[in-house]
């Protein structure tokens, strides 16, 4: 037997189980199946995809979770191309997002980094922060650069350099929208790589933003450039699952893994089918396991092998996304562009996306049903607080979302205009940009890697968003393959 055929034989006789069928788990499964490993994916929900999920609302298939991906890094696009979906790639409409709660509403200024303006004197900035805010922000240019460059907290940095109005009215809504976090908790270097260095060099925060814009480093900033898929992001999950099945991967849904135990060189998985009427318990065996669940489940599954993981009880605040299908001629002109970010504390909703203003493919489908049909997504909940929808019945959630949509869109929307609504609930981990989080997650990964034949991936470690999760899953699958197969082969 040649070395290559020996490796292939070894791979084919290796049973690898991926726990969790979100994008992270499916991508990890693909990487392993491509080299011939026998892979099974176990997903607790009744469909794969995790936070990428479609919903049927009034006959329209809409994204009820992730609706786009950041183009930075090129990893998601490479996956899309590999799966033959290149022709389905779409870009959102050019309209700007708005910010609400000034009081009133205004388009979010063009450019800027996480809402920090390069020039506070610009009309679109002044409209939001007023003359007093502009003069205060201008102090940033004239203050001596003594204390700059060393502030880790984004909120503290912006407040001290440009004042509370820039922080509260521009930066806070963007940071809440992108990270569901408060600016004070966000690490400047992670959220806006290069900003601190540019600040030290130029002597002012606005100068630093200009420098980043000039160097096109903005493409690295979250939300800078996104793409979507005609038909919605769930088509990526459908394509991934078909590819996995072609490669012989078994993707089992409705199977929750309750416990993971190492038994000599194999893993034992205690599972339960999640069919409420007839739950069935089953024990499965695997040579290698990749844990690709949310943070709470991952810590519980891995704690028997890595006890330190039980030390931290993660806060996974709930985010509720309410999709409204509306017949409203007043929305035809997209009065608030592609959507609205709320100044925290001014509304009960966190943000709104006018999906049919943002995505042409969805607008065409909606219009084919009714000339003034629109899809609007209203999201509730943020780090450290329960969503305003907490404890409400579905009807009351829909009524609240409609009322919030009226406020955010600046258009009176009546209950009679609501064709249908859909509620989707999510738990989200602390964002990777929160101060200290990256170091803690690196330590978690290191501890897990000390256990042989196990890998761990997912947004809780990689950071929220497909642009983070996809490359992390690829790297983790490669790590597991290398350490569990090739290294052991080398030792043999
Ligand atoms: C409302 C919303 C909108 C978003 N919008 C965007 C966007 O537009 N662009 C973007 O890039 N990102 C977006 N994100 C973030 C992005 O969707 C996530 O970061 C990413 O999908 C997470 O993938 P994952 O595989 O790590 O986790 P998940 O998608 O959470 O998958 C984990 C899976 O593990 C399963 N599981 C958990 N426990 C077990 C168990 N014990 N046994 C078996 N299975 C288990 C779960 O059911 C789930 O399917 C959004 C997120 C949300 C919530």
Image (cartoon, grey):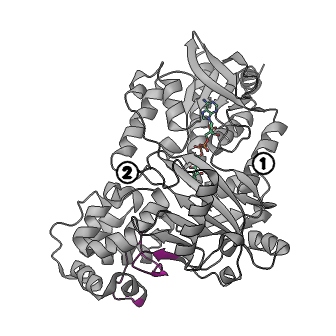
Image position of 223 (left or right of 53)? left
The CA distance from mark 2 to mark 1 is 33 Å
Report whether the residue tagged 1 is closer than 8 Å to ligand 1: no
Q: Residue at x 71, y 32 (%)?
A: 41
Instruction: Check if residue 154 falls in the magenta segment.
Output: no
* Residue for point 63% across, 23% down: 288
Q: Which residues are magenta?
A: 98-123
Precedes in sequence: disc 2 or disc 1: 1
Magenta span: chief secondary structure:
loop
Q: Is residue 82 visible?
A: yes
Q: Secondary structure at mark 2?
A: loop
Residue 319, above or below 175: above
Find disc 2 in the rendering and name its residue: 434
Nearest to the observer: residue 157 or residue 29: 157
**Badge 1 is on which residue?**
238
Q: Quadrant of ligand 1?
A: top right
269 to the left or right of 198: right
- Residue 408 in percent (x, y) is at 53, 73
Q: Is residue 206 left or right of residue 289?
A: left
């Amino acid at each position: 037997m040649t070395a290559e055929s020996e490796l292939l034989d070894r791979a084919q006789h290796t049973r690898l189980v991926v726990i969790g069928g979100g994008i992270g788990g499916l991508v990890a499964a693909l990487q392993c199946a491509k080299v011939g490993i026998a892979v099974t994916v176990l997903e607790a929900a009744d469909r794969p995809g995790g936070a990428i999920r479609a919903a049927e609302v009034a006959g329209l298939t809409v994204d009820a979770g992730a609706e786009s991906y950041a183009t930075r890094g090129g990893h998601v696009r490479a996956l899309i191309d590999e799966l033959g979906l290149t022709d389905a790639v779409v870009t959102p409409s050019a309209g700007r997002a708005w910010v609400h709660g000034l009081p009133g509403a205004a388009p979010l200024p063009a450019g800027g980094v996480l809402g920090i303006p390069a020039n506070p004197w610009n009309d679109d900035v002044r409209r939001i922060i007023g003359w007093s805010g502009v003069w205060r922000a201008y102090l940033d240019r004239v203050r001596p650069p003594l204390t700059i460059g060393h502030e880790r907290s984004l909120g503290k940095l912006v407040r001290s350099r440009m004042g509370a109005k820039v922080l509260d009215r521009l930066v806070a809504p963007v940071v809440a929208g992108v990270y569901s976090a408060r600016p004070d908790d966000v690490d400047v270097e992670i959220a806006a790589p290069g900003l601190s260095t540019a600040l030290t060099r130029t002597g002012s925060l606005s100068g630093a933003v200009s420098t980043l814009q000039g160097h096109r480093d903005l493409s690295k900033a979250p939300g800078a450039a996104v793409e979507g898929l005609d038909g919605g992001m769930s088509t990526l999950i459908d394509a991934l699952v078909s590819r996995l099945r072609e490669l012989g991967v078994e993707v089992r849904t409705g199977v929750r893994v309750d416990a993971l135990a190492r038994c000599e060189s194999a893993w034992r998985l205690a599972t339960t089918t999640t069919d409420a009427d007839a739950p069935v318990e089953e024990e499965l065996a695997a040579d290698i396991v990749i844990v690709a669940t949310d943070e709470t489940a991952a810590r519980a599954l891995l704690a028997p092998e890595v006890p330190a993981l039980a030390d931290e009880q993660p806060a996974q605040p709930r985010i509720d996304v309410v999709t409204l299908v509306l017949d409203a001629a007043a929305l035809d002109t997209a009065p608030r562009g592609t959507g609205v970010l709320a100044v925290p504390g001014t509304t009960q909703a966190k943000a709104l996306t006018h999906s049919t203003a943002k995505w042409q493919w969805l607008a065409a489908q909606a219009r084919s049903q009714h000339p003034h049909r629109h899809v609007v997504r209203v999201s509730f909940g943020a780090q450290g607080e329960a969503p305003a929808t907490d404890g409400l019945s579905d009807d009351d959630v829909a009524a609240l979302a409609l009322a919030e949509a009226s406020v955010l869109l600046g258009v009176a929307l009546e209950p009679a205009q609501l064709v249908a609504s859909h509620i989707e609930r999510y738990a989200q981990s602390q964002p990777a940009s929160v101060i200290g989080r990256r170091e803690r997650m690196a330590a978690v990964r290191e501890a897990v890697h000390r256990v042989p034949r196990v890998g761990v991936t997912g947004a809780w470690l990689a950071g929220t968003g497909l642009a983070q999760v996809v490359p992390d899953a690829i790297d983790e699958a490669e790590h597991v393959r290398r350490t569990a197969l090739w290294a052991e082969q080398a030792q043999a």
